[in-house]
Amino acid sequence: MKKLILGLFIVLLPALGLAAGPSGPLDTVAVDHTNKASLQRGVALFSNYCLGCHSMEYGRYGRIADDLDIPRPLYEENLIFTGVRIGELIEIGMDKNQAAAWFGNAPPDLTLVGRLRGEDWLYSYFRAFYKDDTRPLGVNNAVFANVGMPHVLVDMQGLCAVPPRIGTAPSVDPLSGNVRNADICPEWAIEGSMEPAEFNAAMYDLTNFLSYMGDPVKVERERLGILVLIFIAIFFIFAYLLNREYWKDVH
Ligand code: HEC
């Protein structure tokens, strides 16, 4: 019995590893890989704003186009800027050593970042940039302290003057009925072109896309999983009947 309990404990150990995620409060987000429109907006954002620095070298352009129902010629025309063929891996030309000299750290490959950091972290990180004149690029990040990445979406979001409130849900003041913390930033140093809610929606799409890249077969896997369970359930009936038939004369 003791051995059984020990065995069970060892089997469950990896689950503890998952729970020990990054520290600090995060905003939560529920990604949906079946929402193709969201994923399409996400890949457009990624291609326009991120691909200059970040590769996705374990993925191919063509796979994304097929999975997200984007016709290949359309994808090639609008979302590949380096002139490579659509069947190629998503690599970039930036030299890692040089990039490390520019930013302090080289921009990492982002194919699996959704698996590494988790969706909540990504969604929070994208919205957590703020003005900090002590940093080389004039910005810092409330989720990733002293990050080397510039705030590339400053035109869209604007720049918060103070660390944004990540992980604090809006609450209603019981006396006045006003909503507190509806917006993560109380004061903007630079105004963006988007309303905060609009920017959140765009960051949801970007997070959704990065999450999909880390696990492109998720939808298919879950669909197959249900079919397999149905098969096992039906198979059980026949296995049971057969078993009864075999043992009928023995008992
Ligand atoms: C000008 C280059 C540049 C651009 C453009 C850029 N990044 Fe980055 N990014 C970096 C650098 C440099 C780092 C590493 C920061 C560090 O480690 O301090 C980084 C780090 C990250 C990380 C954290 C990775 C990790 O796990 O440590 C994520 C996620 C990320 N970038 C996503 C994006 C997304 C999404 C976009 C497009 C909206 C983008 N980046 C655009 C340079 C860039």
Image (tube, helix red, strand yellow):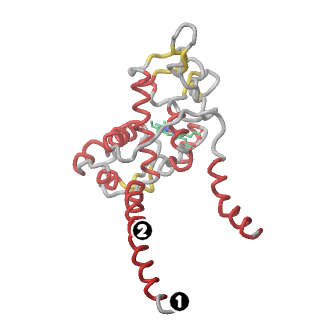
Which residue matches tag 2?
Answer: 233
Mark 1 nearby-residue class (10 Å; few <14, some 14–19, many ≥20): few
Q: Looking at the image, which is closer to me, 249 or 112?
A: 249
Which residue matches tag 1?
Answer: 251
Question: Which residue sits at x=32%, y=44%?
Answer: 36
Q: Is residue 46 above or below residue 177?
A: below
Amino acid of disc 1: His
The N terminus: image quadrant: bottom right
Q: Name the image quarter holding residue 23.
A: top right
Q: Is residue 219 above or below residue 184?
A: below
Question: Which residue sits at x=60%, y=23%?
Answer: 163
Residue 241 pos. (x, y %): 42, 79
Q: Looking at the image, which is closer to me, 128 or 220?
A: 220
Q: Name the image quarter holding residue 13.
A: bottom right
- Check disc 2 and report its element: helix, strand or loop: helix
Residue 29: numbered disc = none
Q: Name the image quarter holding residue 172.
A: top right
Q: Hey, which residue is sitting farthest bottom in the picture?
A: 249
Mark 2 nearby-residue class (10 Å; few <14, some 14–19, many ≥20): few
